[in-house]
Image: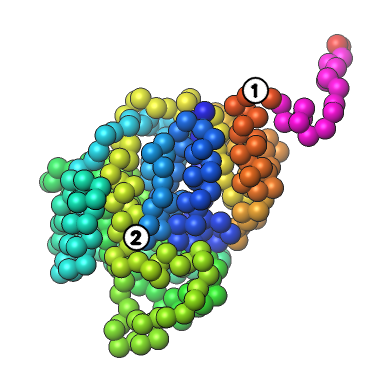
Amino acid sequence: MFGVCIIPTGIGAEIGGHAGDGNAVARLLAGSCDTLVVHPNVVNAADINEMTPNMLYVEGSMLDRFLEGDIGLSRVKSNKILLVTNPPVKSNVINSVSAARVTLGLDISILPLKTPLQMIGRFEDGSATGDVIGWEELVDQVQSYEFDALAIHTPIDLPRDIRLNYYRNGGVNPWGGVEAKCSRLIGHAIGKPAAHAPVENIDPLDVELYTFDEIVDPRISPELVSVSYLHCLMKGLHKAPRIGNKITYEDIDFLVSPFGCVGRPHRACIKHNIPVIVVKENKTCLNDPIPEQFLVAENYLEAVGVIQAMKEGISLESIRRPIGPTVIHTR
């Protein structure tokens, strides 16, 4: 079985919409299939990433194009990673990269950007989005370097009250939308795996935020215990598949998604008759109508049951209640 798990960022998914709280779900789903494709938001948890060896880490725009049939994917043993950051390069960035080199065995270099990348987070109709300024200059600069995957490590500007409210009250991740936009723009332009990790840019004189020391929602906690937020994407990009022809949408057996959101991946699955399982417990701030052909599971435990039934060739109707065969009347 070859599956896909998506949890779009910036739309307030109850599970996986915060800081890597989709890791446990992804691990559960990965245990029910041979290969599971995830995008960064599912497993990125700042300095934590618990993806399993049978997961493929695929950036959102590349995943959309893959499901639409525009590109295929090829597995790799490892990628040469280029990490770009706004100057000056901070010591904790160098130390984080060094730690990844000695633990994961990464081949990774750090490149200061000539034109600093500016990212501004904001809300629009309840969802997180934002503006990315200077991404074209970034793309131009990295074109002259040899690498397989791009890590982007830059600050995200957010109003102080939004940041503090998120830490204390949760809700829609305020920087998730602009991060997704950044990686999509840049990843599509360079045609290689790309992912973004934010740089902490809180004023040291802002004691309440800079030394924030409160118990938070468990789904937010990975951010509060991390230093550079880099390790999640370095682990993901290490073996992220490249554009190729070994794996195509025809290999996909199912897609699992939160309930109430229907976008490019879902529409691609409808077009190619790939079963889509939506999980009611994982609601979002959206309320998109659910196509009638989608399979609705109450929670991820039930979703795994649906996948197992597919794997064994068992119809869902035969499990849920005794029914007789459909009789087709001739005309």
Left or right of residue 103, residue 132 in this image: right
What amino acid is found at the position of numbered circle 1 in the picture?
Gly
Prevailing secondary structure of the magenta residues: loop
Residue type beneath disc 2: Asp
Q: Nearer the viewer, residue 46 or 330?
A: 46
Residue 2, above or below 46: above
Residue 160 falls in image quadrant: bottom left
Whole-angstrom CA distance, mark 1 to mark 2, is: 40 Å
Give the image location of residue 175, x and y in percent.
42, 65
Could you say where residue 239 lies in the image, as x and y percent from the top left?
Answer: 30, 40
Instruction: Say which residue appears at 53% left-offset and 48% top-offset.
Output: 25
Residue 134: tell me if it is visible. no
Q: Which residue is mark 2?
A: 47
Residue at the limit of the structure toward the top, as seen here: 330
Q: Which residue is at 83% across, 16% downward?
A: 328
24 with respect to 238 (left or right): right
Q: Is residue 43 visible?
A: yes
| Picture colour scheme | rainbow
Q: Residue at x 65, y 53 (%)?
A: 281
- Circle 1 sits on which residue? 313
Q: Position of residue 104 (x, y in %)?
A: 25, 47
Look at the picture and state if 330 lies above or below 304: above
Q: Secondary structure at mark 1?
A: loop
SS at badge 2:
loop
Residue 191: which numbered mark, if any?
none
How many marks the image carries: the answer is 2
Quadrant in the rendering for residue 152: bottom left
Looking at this view, name the residue that lies furthest to the front: 103
